Amino acid sequence: QLFEAQSCTFTYLLADAATGDAVVIDPVLDTVPRELRLLRELGLSLRYAVNTHCHADHVTGSGALCRALGCASAISRASGARADLLLRGGDELRFGAF
């Protein structure tokens, strides 16, 4: 769990230690450099930048991570936002053994 103080926003990093696959949930544009540094330090490969809701700070944060690392973005289809993957109830995002 990571915290961005200005917007009081939590970002989550999930990873499979065995494979190095990772997912970032609700990234914030202002802290993308922190997430990039953390992924690099931990030797992780970002597979998805996922948003649980459509806020500008998250959508732009996901976009920045995807541009930097070539990962896919994901959000609920019902949000009306654009992403590489538009999810519906019951969909799964697989990374590593998860």
Image (cartoon, grey):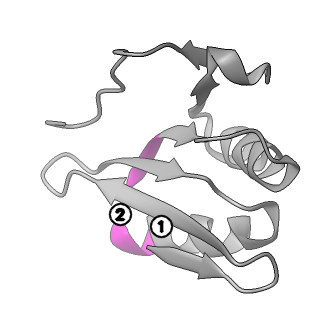
Q: Is residue 53 left or right of residue 17?
A: right
The spot of residue 68 in percent (x, y) is 70, 47
Task: Say which element carries label 2.
Answer: loop
Residue located farthest toward the bottom when viewing the structure as drawn: 5
Where on the picture, by quarter, is residue 96? top left
Residue 29, by quadrant, is bottom right
Q: Is residue 60 left or right of residue 84?
A: right
Q: Can you tell which quarter of the image residue 34 is in? A: bottom right
Task: Find the magenta span and give its range.
Answer: 40-47
Which residue shows up at 55% across the image and 64% down it? Answer: 11
Q: Position of residue 66 (x, y in %)?
A: 68, 39
43 or 35: which is nearer to us? 35
The amino acid pointed to by label 2 is: Gly
Q: Which residue is mark 1?
A: 40
Identify the disc placed on residue 78: none
Towards the viewer: 23 or 6: 6
Q: Which residue occupies 57% across, 34% down?
A: 71
Would you say residue 84 is visible in this rendering?
no
Q: Residue at x 62, y 34 (%)?
A: 70
Write down the residue under mark 2. 43
Identify the image quadrant of the C terminus: top left
Instruction: Give the structural element (helix, strand or loop) at label 1.
Output: helix
Q: What distance separates the C-alpha of mark 1 from that of mark 2?
A: 5 Å
Q: Position of residue 41 (x, y in %)?
A: 42, 75
Quadrant holding the N terminus: bottom left
Q: Please determine whether, in this image, residue 58 is positioned above or below residue 81.
A: below
**Kind of residue at disc 1:** Arg
Image check: 33 left or right of 22?
Answer: right
66 and 98: which one is in front? 98
Residue 27 in sight: yes
Q: Tags 1 and 2 in contact by the CB under 8 Å rule?
A: yes
